[in-house]
Amino acid sequence: MNKEEKNWQNFCQNHIQKWYGTWTKYTAEGKVIDSVQSLRSFDTNTEKTLLSQKNSYTYPDGKIEERQWKATKESINREDGFIHPKHPWMRSLFFEEGAALWVTKYSQPDIISHKSELFFRHQDLRLSVGTVYDQDGNLQMFWNFR
């Protein structure tokens, strides 16, 4: 089995479900920017060739924000990882045990220098931690989703 297929199978085996939790963003100094109830929902068609992702955020004031992405296996799955649906300069690798990562493959001038997110999974629990660095290498913010 090639790397692309193994990466896709690992994703489908470990991440196709609804992940309920709290998403908290922090400044580089560790102060909370915001904290919201969140749902990351992943689904595929029967053939596992079409991926749907829906993120829902419920803010303390009751406001709900939703973001959705759809992609085909063929359009995002590459030898060097999944192409991020929102940030094409990022790639994701999914491991057999359930851990995963999103990481910057190349920097985007005037946007960010480096962005990453690590996913740790144990049974039906998942924790992710992400970072954003500016072009000078300074930590701009970090977050966790648990």
Image (cartoon, rainbow, N blue to C red):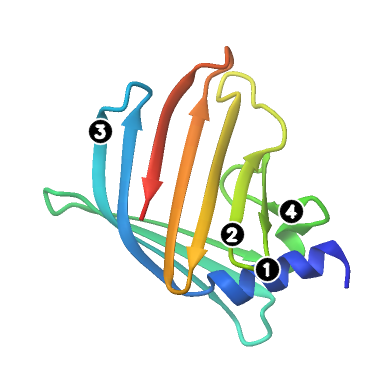
Numbered disc in front, either 3 or 4: 3
Q: CA distance from mark 3 to mark 2?
A: 26 Å
Name which of mark 3 and mark 1 comes first in the sequence. 3
Amino acid type of the residue tagged 3 in the rendering: Val
Q: CA distance from mark 1 to mark 4?
A: 14 Å
Q: What secondary structure is marked by label 2? A: loop
Residue 53 spot, x, y in % from top left:
50, 64
Residue mark closest to the camera, 3 vs 1:
1
* Circles 3 and 4: CB atoms closer than 8 Å: no
- Image quadrant occupied by the N terminus: bottom right
What is the quadrant of residue 55 in the picture?
bottom left
Q: Amino acid at mark 4?
A: Gly
- Give the residue pinned by disc 3: 32
| Quarter location, residue 100 | bottom right
Which badge, 1 or 4, is on the more N-terminal residue? 4
Residue at which label 2 appears: 99
Q: Residue at x 53, y 44 (%)?
A: 117
Q: Amino acid at mark 2?
A: Ala
Question: Which of label 3 and label 2 is nearer to you?
Answer: 2
Q: Which residue is mark 1?
A: 96
Type of amino acid at the residue the image marks with label 1: Glu
User: Upstream in the sequence, badge 3 or badge 2?
Assistant: 3
* Mark identifier at residue 81: 4
Q: Residues within 10 Å of mark 3 (few under 14, many from 20)?
A: some
> Dot 4, crowdedness within 10 Å: few (<14), some or many (≥20)?
many
What separation in Å lies between label 3 and label 4 (alpha carbons)?
31 Å
